[in-house]
Image (spheres, rainbow, N blue to C red):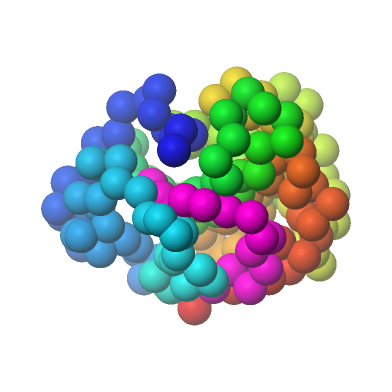
């Protein structure tokens, strides 16, 4: 499975889980190790692939999944990628990436444009939209993100959620976003 973060360098230590802010989902030590090893799940995990996060609408057709973690610059990133078995350059490829970013300074949607994310930055010309009942930033996927739509929002102070849906999943983006719940 090609990883959205395979081109980047991830720095994740066993202490990663211990430094998270209250109210922000964090990976277990085992998930950090799996992320560092780029281990994949076949079949992929379901709605509770991320501890503390529920993704109620996961489109069908995924063959593999992978937890992705990173810690850098005072933030931690914790996500899960679902993918089918097509090449990432195939415009029919089905992939979904849901990520939670624990960023203590996050309070307003406009801050995401200058967010300290490793991959999945809101550069270019992101727009504000209402998707799945949430006010989000949205932009076309580009570069490491691939084709499709990339959205993000501040779930609560210090907690950002991002979603990258490949082009075939864009019609389901409203359901995907609406179905994400943090515990």
Q: In this view, does 164 lie to the left or right of 28?
A: right
Q: Which residue is drawn at 66% across and 37% down?
A: 93
| Residue 139 location, quadrant | top right
* Residue 98 percent coordinates (x, y): 55, 53
Q: Is residue 28 left or right of residue 147?
A: left
Residue 137 appears anywhere in the view: no
Q: Residue at x 39, y 29 (%)?
A: 6
Q: How many marks?
A: 0
| Residue 125 location, quadrant | top right
User: Which residue of the protein is positioned furthest toward the bottom in this rendering?
Assistant: 183
| Residue 141 location, quadrant | top right
Q: Does the magenta stretch include residue 55?
A: yes
Q: Is residue 34 magenta?
A: no
Q: Magenta span covers which residues?
A: 54-68
* Residue 126 percent coordinates (x, y): 76, 33
Q: Which residue is drawn at 57% across and 53% down?
A: 62
The residue lying toward the viewer, choosing from 93 and 154, is 93
The residue lying toward the viewer, choosing from 10 and 66, is 66
């Amino acid at each position: 499975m090609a990883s959205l973060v395979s081109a980047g360098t991830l720095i994740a230590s066993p202490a990663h889980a211990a430094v998270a802010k209250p109210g922000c989902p964090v990976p277990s030590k085992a998930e950090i190790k799996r992320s560092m090893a780029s281990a994949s799940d076949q079949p992929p995990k379901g709605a509770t692939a991320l501890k503390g996060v529920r993704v109620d609408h996961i489109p069908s057709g995924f063959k593999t999944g992978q937890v992705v973690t990173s810690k850098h610059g005072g933030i931690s990133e914790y996500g899960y990628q679902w993918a089918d078995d097509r090449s990432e350059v195939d415009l029919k490829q089905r992939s979904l990436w849901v990520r939670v970013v624990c960023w203590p300074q996050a309070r307003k949607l406009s801050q995401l444009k200058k967010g300290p994310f490793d991959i999945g930055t809101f550069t270019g010309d992101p727009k504000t939209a209402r998707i799945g009942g949430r006010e989000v930033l949205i932009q076309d996927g580009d570069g490491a993100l691939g084709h499709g739509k990339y959205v993000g929002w501040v779930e609560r102070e210090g907690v950002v959620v991002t979603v990258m849906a490949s082009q075939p999943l864009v019609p389901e983006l409203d359901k995907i976003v609406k179905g994400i719940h943090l515990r």
